[in-house]
Amino acid sequence: MRKTSARLADGREIIYFDESDAQRELRDPRDPAPPPTASELRFDPLLEEWVVLAAHRQGRTHLPATAECPLCPSGGGRQTEIPASSYDVVAFENRFPALAFGDPPYDGTEELPVPRRAGEGRCEVLCFAADHDASFVDLSPRRVRTIVDVWADRTRELSELPGVEQVFCFENRGPEIGVTLHHPHGQIYAYSFRTPRTRRTLDSAQRYRERTGRDLFADDLRAERNAGVRVVRRSEHWTAFVPAAARWPVELRIYPNRRVADLPELTDAERDDFSLLYLDILGRLDRLFDAPLPYVAAWHQAPVRTQRDLAYLHLELFSVRRAPGKLKYLAGSEAAMGVFVNDVLPETTAQRLREAAP
């Protein structure tokens, strides 16, 4: 894989990850522009969580026509976010970032009853392919392997930025999930704090270790493998299963069979094996309702500096689709109280996914 870094017209970084040794023209011909606007963090003392306020994102691009897609290669007299006529995989700093390094968007004179600080961090867009009409499931195993390597590369490099505490790689697929661009892509967030989900999960793992002396994630994986009823697919290096307490009508966790803290720790064999298993899982998801399934695919990996010995890398994948033509909405119990009500038994979902094998 050939890695080449350049700068866009407004100073944002763009990085090409090519599967060949082709040389690239790296100049962005667009006129110079100001850098992206910074955001703000405000602390909710009731939940002890940071909330990101990024008002500039109200104007971000929303479901443009194919001819106006900003993630397609440039050409035909139209310049996109990617100033190249073709590419394999490319990452670049988001034009409308939720988090960014820069001056805070407030002057500090307004008093608030809660702590606030600049929304420092970095948000990258990761384009999986130049083909606008493709989806992750359409990619070759080689391309998926390239993407795994890119996830590991970006995790490693973003973890070295000053103040970054956690790196989160994810993909949102489908407008039902909230996708605003149809082009096949994901995102990578570098947070300046540990996210609430990670903090709560690792605190649970800490208490479990103090109580039992064992690893919570490893024991959860072992229990599911032994039970077997919710396992969808096992390979030499990975296991995909529906969790026993699944919140979503379609939900999977994909664990490496060997505990690693983050994506950079995966071996070549584990990366190769994941590429094949993941394409198989995505194909099953689309066959579940005979239509492309909207989903979120989220990598859970260790924070940069704390509790790394407690973390166990895994991919969480879930969908709001509960039946053909029906979506799962976060209504009163879920949205207000945080108590999920799942209309589909996890064992039923696992059985249906096993039957959806090619």
Image (spheres, rainbow, N blue to C red):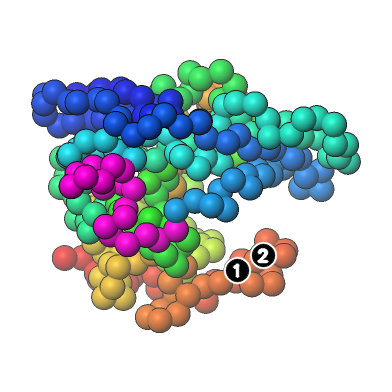
Name, please, the residue furthest toward the bottom.
325
Residue at the spot 32% in from the left edge and 62% down from the top edge: 65
Residue 85 lies, in percent from the top left, at 17, 39
Residue 322 lies, in percent from the top left, at 44, 75
Residue 337 in view here: yes
Labels 2 & 1 near each other (Cβ < 8 A): yes
**Badge 2 amino acid:** Ala
Residue 16 lies, in percent from the top left, at 26, 30
Q: Say if the magenta span includes residue 70.
A: yes
Side (left or right) of 18 relative to 336: left
**Badge 1 amino acid:** Leu
The dominant secondary structure in magenta is loop
Q: Give neighbour class at mark 1: few <14, some 14-19, many 20+ (Cα, 10 Å).
A: some
Residue at the spot 21% in from the left edge and 65% down from the top edge: 357
Residue at the spot 15% in from the left edge and 32% down from the top edge: 19
Q: Say if the magenta span includes residue 2.
A: no
Q: Quadrant of residue 127?
A: top left
Q: Mark 1 = which residue?
A: 330
Q: Mark 2 = which residue?
A: 335
Q: Quadrant of residue 182?
A: bottom left
**As displayed, is residue 248 above or below residue 84?**
below
**Which span of residues is magenta-colored?**
62-80
Q: Nearer the viewer, residue 195 or 180?
A: 180
- Mark 2 or mark 1: name the one nearer the start of the chain: 1
Q: So how many labels did they put on this image?
A: 2
Residue at the spot 20% in from the left edge and 51% down from the top edge: 131
Residue 264 in view here: no
Side (left or right) of 159 relative to 132: right
